Image (cartoon, rainbow, N blue to C red):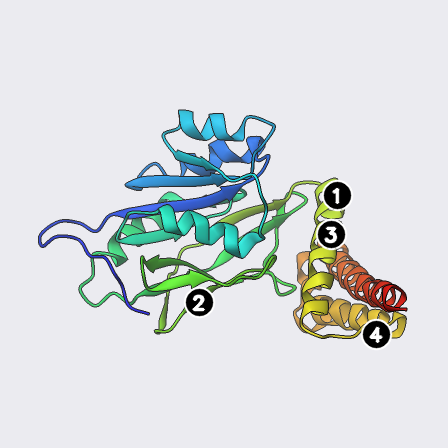
Amino acid sequence: MRSESGSAAGTAPRISAILITRNEARNIADCLAGLLWCDEIVVVDGASTDGTADVARRLGARVEIRADWPGFGPQKNRALDLAGGDWVLSIDADERVTPALAAEIRSVVLRPDALDAYSLPRLSSYCGQFMRHGGWYPDRVVRLFRRGSARFSDDIVHESVRTDGPVGRLRHDLLHISYRSLDDVLDKMNRYSSAGATKLLDRGRRGSVASAFGHAAWAFARAYLLRRGFLDGRLGFVLACAIAQETWYRYLKLWLLQRHQTDAGR
């Protein structure tokens, strides 16, 4: 894919920030506060009931309501299709662009030798602590790209940016306020394990109680030992347990979905 847009000679490239939301009232103001330097902010909201859309509009964002839910990837492509800038910066509502990262982005898009896409190192918090081990950092994600040079995958969860060209690497962290409390952990664990099980089923994967246990045990060992999650202290252990638990439920739900399909086919 190649870029379909470009700034006029002698003018700075325009940057569009895009994000999708659903009941993100506690996050949206802080998120948008770090994006006010962008030329436009596009929000595709999934019919929030907590005033998310109203807050976004008050802060100058263009808000489009899309009540149906096609999945994270397709929803982000909807936001991408609404962007008009030369460059697109994709952000989640629980992420924060620091002044240092904003300055780096503005600098890189001005370079004549700029690539079509860039990954950002993401630093995520867990129950109030930023985690630098356990496979959580630097957690590079492609979030900055020329409009027309990339699209999001159609995955309903854990979507990714697809681009044909080389991907550059930015240096400053994108902050991710991902799990504020244990309630957040449990809520996302349930939702993500369900979506992950459906994704595995669609790909023809098979599950069982034994495979669920094996995958969960490996997930803990990889996060806590191989990826040195123990260096994050007690919360490093808690995080490794949560990763294992989400893995356990994902494969257990896959097994139950298979049983349901088998029973329905009889």
**Label 2 element class:** strand
> Label 2 vs label 4: CA separation?
30 Å
Q: Amino acid at mark 3?
A: Met
Q: Is residue 211 above or below residue 239?
A: below
Disc 2 or 1, which lies upstream in sequence? Answer: 2
Question: For residue 213, which quarter of the picture?
Answer: bottom right
According to the image, label 1 marks what residue?
182
Q: Residues within 10 Å of mark 2 (few under 14, many from 20)?
A: some
> Label 1 vs label 4: CA separation?
26 Å
Residue at x-position 74% and y-position 63%: 197
Disc 4 or 3, which lies upstream in sequence? Answer: 3
Residue at x-position 28% and y-position 68%: 2
> Label 3 vs label 1: CA separation?
10 Å
Closer to the observer: label 3 or label 2? 2
Disc 2 or 4, which lies upstream in sequence? Answer: 2
Disc 3 or 1, which lies upstream in sequence? Answer: 1
